[in-house]
Amino acid sequence: MTMSFSPPLVKVESLHKSYGPNIQVLKGLDIEMKPGERVVVIGPSGGGKSTLLRVIMGLEKIDSGSITFGGKPYISSAGRDKKTIIDTEVRRSIGMVFQHYTLFPHLSVLQNLILAPCKVRGEKKEIAIKRAQALLERFGLAAKANSYPAQLSGGQKQRVAIARALMLDPKLMLFDEVTSALDPELVAEVEQVILQLAAQNMPMMIVTHDMWFARNIASRVIFCAGGAVVEDGPPEQVLGSPKEERTRDFIDRVFHIRQ
Amino acid sequence: MELDFSIVARFQNALALGLWTTIQLTLICIVLGCALGFLIGLARTSRSAVVRAVSSVYVEFFRGTPVLIQLFWIFFCLPLILGVELPNFASGIIALTLYMGAITSETFRASLKSVGREQLDACIALGLPRRVQVTSVILPQAVLRAIPTLLSNCVSLFKESALVSAVGIADLMFIGQNISNNTARPVEVLTIVALIYFIIAFPLARAVSLVERRILAKLAI
């Protein structure tokens, strides 16, 4: 057995987050994610899965707690008014894909891909275009470079959104229910792209309701309910023979619905 | 009484001159009014409560009072306040620009609001700095979405510009009224004048729905 002293990629400590005074979504959540892990977060709606991803992306204010990324402080809350402090430099090494694509509708596929590299990193346009074309080629979208998002299918849009995030060479990818809005026959093409990334050891955190996908992509599954981690372990355990009662209930219900 | 439309033909040069004045006035006020409206639209989403309050009062005042009164007010009161006599044409431009600014600011405000929270999330996830979020993502979408309504605003302004005849600006309406008074042929003259307005406004209004469909198709909203 080898001991690894590399810091965790993401370390979430006693994270609290509420929307307004009465709706507490995350109630002291702790997660440690090692480099190279692919964590799938499952759980009932309202259990805080998507909020967790949004917090890690730096899209939400937090009440208390902290997150480090690669051993460096990333998000914390400080001061009397509990202001959320986000290190935007660290944030740039994280990419996210959303349920509703969120492509920029007024820009072509190619323009969607090169906007951030050119404007954020000052990359030369020709170089960005070359990289974008290579990515689109890899995802089977080469012919769509000059199309607008409205001219694409849901599956194509979501693949473009993944390519757009990859243009910034993220060290962690977050996928928030990326196939939930898709027609059933389009789910596979998006999941294939994510599996492709997994094969290249891209660290990722995925929120999904698709248990087949979860089983196939996860190196670790976290069951999250009521704003805290209920069960955390390898996919065979959490999805196959969960230890916790609440996890078992959830898994039973999900598979029952899918039959 | 027999209708005799041929009488209008005698005044075609005068009417053409009036139409030219109307078009000039409308175009100038469209450009200035849209620019003003854009700024006011931004001001109404400002973080400063004072800026929001001042811009809201301005917009509600000009939206809530008759354009004719605004015209008279600028025409009579502005010289008293500024201490300078303004040419008719200038006070017409000021009044219609202020009016157009108030109307289009609402158009811009609505279109700015229509760019959803999700677009901002995407901007943040891509690490776009605030300036790039505004110039490359929010403003282009807001302006695109505003175009159909702005075009309707412009068509309305073209028709409402006829009110400037009341302060003695020799626009199409003013010339038409003069001819009608001098010839005692109000039916023929005013019908022709109305037709001239219609021939210009109608295709523009049709163009609005065409542009609307194109833009909606492109943005898929």
Image (cartoon, rainbow, N blue to C red):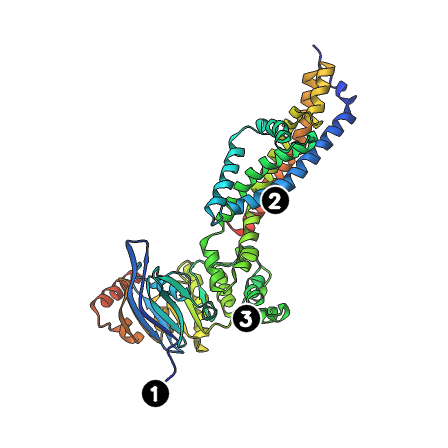
Does residue A45 sit above or below B204 in this rendering? below
- In-front residue for pair B8/B77: B77
Q: Which one is in front in this view, the residue at disc 2 or the one at disc 3?
A: 2
> In the rendered image, is residue A169 in sight?
yes
Look at mark 2 in the image and give the residue it sits on: B35
Q: Horizontally, is B190 left or right of A2 in the view? A: right
Q: Chain of mark 1?
A: A
Give the residue at x 59% y 42%.
B36
Helix, strand or loop at label 1? It is loop
Residue A50 horizontal/vertical position (percent): 36, 62
> In terms of image quadrants, where is residue B153?
top right
| Residue A3 numbered tag | 1
Disc 1 residue type?
A: Met
Q: Are marks 2 and 3 on the same chain?
A: no
Q: Residue reaching furthest front?
A: B83
Label 2 environment density (alpha carbons within 10 Å; few <14, some 14–19, many ≥20)? some
The chain ID associated with circle 3 is: A
